Image: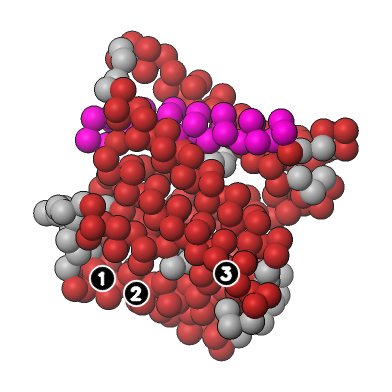
C-alpha cells in the first residue's frame, strides 16, 4: 500500500472489512431482543431496500440483460438468504469473533475445487494456507468459547457451510456479470429474491408471533445496511485495485471483530487459544488469497 495507486483501493478494502466486522457486533445487540430465526427478515429486508434504491439511481437499466438477470435471481434464491440464516445462528452460538473467522474460509473451497475438478496444481503457499486454516479452526474448536459459551465441535459447521455457499455462488455471479456488468443490479435482484425466500420461510410464523421489540428490529436493519455497504466497498475496491491487494485486507475482518468485541461487548472475552486460532486461520486465508 506504499504505492499511491494502492491507497484508495486499500482504504476501501479496509472499510469493507470494518463493515463486515461491525455487522457481527450489531448482530449480538439485536439477538438480545429478536430471536435468531426472525432476524434475517430485517437484515435482508434492509439490504434489499438500500440496494434497490441505489440501483434505481445508478444502474443503466437500458442495457438490461435477461439471461444475466435470471442468473442473479437464481443466486438470490440461495444467497444471501441462507448465508444470513447460517451466519446469525453461528454468531449466536459462537460469538462474533469465532463465527467471523470460521466463516471467512471461503477461499479454501475455491482452492480445493480448482485442484479436484479443474486439475490445477496446488502451490506451496496455498498448501501452507490450507494447513493454517485447518489448524486455526482446530484451535478454535479446542477452546474458542467466549462469554461463558460452550459449544460442540459440530457448531463450527454452521459458518463453514455459509462459507461453502459463498464460494459456490461466485462462478454464477461472475458469469452473470460477464453478460451484464452491473454489480448493483446483481445485488438488488439477489436481495429482492432473498427477501421473497425469507418471507416465504418465516413470514407466517412472524405474523403469528406478533411484533418484536422495535429497537431489536433496528439493530438487524443496521446489520443489513452494514453488510450491504461492505459489499459495495468491496466491489469498489476491486474496481480500482488488484485482488491480491484487496482480498487479503478484507480477510482481516475477524481480527477487527475481536477488537470491536473487546470495546463494545464486555461479556465477549476470548481465551488465548481461541484468539490464536483466529489469528492462524486469518493468516491461512491471506496465504490462500495471495497464492491464487
Circle 3: element type: helix
Q: Nearer the viewer, residue 206 or 264?
A: 264
Query: Mark 3 vs mark 1: which is more N-terminal?
Result: 3
| Of 169 and 232, the residue lying toward us | 232
Residue at x 21% of width, y 73% of height: 273
- Asked whether disc 2 touches disc 3, contact meaning CB atoms under 8 Å apart, the reply is no
State the image coordinates of residue 235 (x, y, percent, origin top left): 64, 55
Q: CA distance from mark 3 to mark 1?
A: 25 Å
Tell me the number on the disc at residue 10.
3
Classify mark 1: helix, strand or loop: helix
In the rendered view, does 172 fall on the left or right side of 80? right
Q: Is residue 267 left or right of residue 14?
A: left
Residues packed near mark 3 inside 10 Å, few (<14), some (14 to 19) or many (20 plus): many
The location of residue 212, given as percent across then percent down, is: 29, 20
Q: Are marks 2 and 1 in contact (CB under 8 Å)?
A: yes
**Is residue 185 shown left or right of residue 167?**
right
Magenta residue span = 31-57
Amino acid at each position: 500500500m506504499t504505492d499511491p495507486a494502492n491507497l484508495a483501493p486499500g482504504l476501501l478494502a479496509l472499510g469493507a472489512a470494518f463493515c463486515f466486522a461491525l455487522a457481527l457486533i450489531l448482530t449480538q445487540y439485536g439477538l438480545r431482543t429478536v430471536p435468531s430465526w426472525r432476524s434475517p427478515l430485517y437484515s435482508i429486508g434492509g439490504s434489499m431496500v438500500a440496494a434497490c434504491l441505489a440501483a434505481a439511481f445508478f444502474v443503466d437499466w437500458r442495457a438490461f440483460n435477461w439471461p444475466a438477470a435470471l442468473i442473479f435471481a437464481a443466486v438470490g434464491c440461495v444467497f444471501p438468504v441462507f448465508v444470513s440464516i447460517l451466519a446469525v445462528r453461528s454468531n449466536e452460538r459462537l460469538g462474533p469473533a469465532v463465527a467471523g473467522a470460521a466463516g471467512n474460509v471461503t477461499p479454501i473451497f475455491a482452492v480445493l475445487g480448482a485442484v479436484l475438478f479443474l486439475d490445477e496444481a496446488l502451490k506451496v503457499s496455498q498448501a501452507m494456507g490450507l494447513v493454517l486454516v485447518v489448524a486455526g479452526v482446530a484451535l478454535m474448536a479446542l477452546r474458542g468459547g467466549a462469554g461463558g459459551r460452550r459449544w460442540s465441535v459440530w457448531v463450527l459447521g454452521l459458518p463453514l457451510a455459509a462459507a461453502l455457499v459463498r464460494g459456490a455462488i461466485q462462478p454464477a455471479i461472475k458469469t452473470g456479470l460477464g453478460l451484464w456488468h452491473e454489480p448493483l443490479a446483481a445485488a438488488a435482484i439477489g436481495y429482492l429474491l432473498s427477501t421473497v425466500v425469507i418471507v416465504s420461510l418465516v413470514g407466517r410464523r412472524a405474523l403469528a408471533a406478533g411484533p418484536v421489540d422495535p429497537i431489536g428490529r433496528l439493530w438487524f436493519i443496521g446489520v443489513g445496511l452494514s453488510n450491504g455497504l461492505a459489499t459495495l466497498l468491496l466491489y469498489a475496491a476491486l474496481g480500482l485495485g488488484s485482488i491480491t491487494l484487496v482480498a487479503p485486507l478484507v480477510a482481516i475482518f475477524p481480527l477487527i471483530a475481536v477488537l470491536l468485541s473487546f470495546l463494545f461487548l464486555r461479556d465477549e472475552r476470548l481465551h488465548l487459544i481461541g484468539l490464536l486460532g483466529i489469528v492462524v486461520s486469518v493468516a491461512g486465508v491471506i496465504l490462500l488469497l495471495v497464492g491464487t
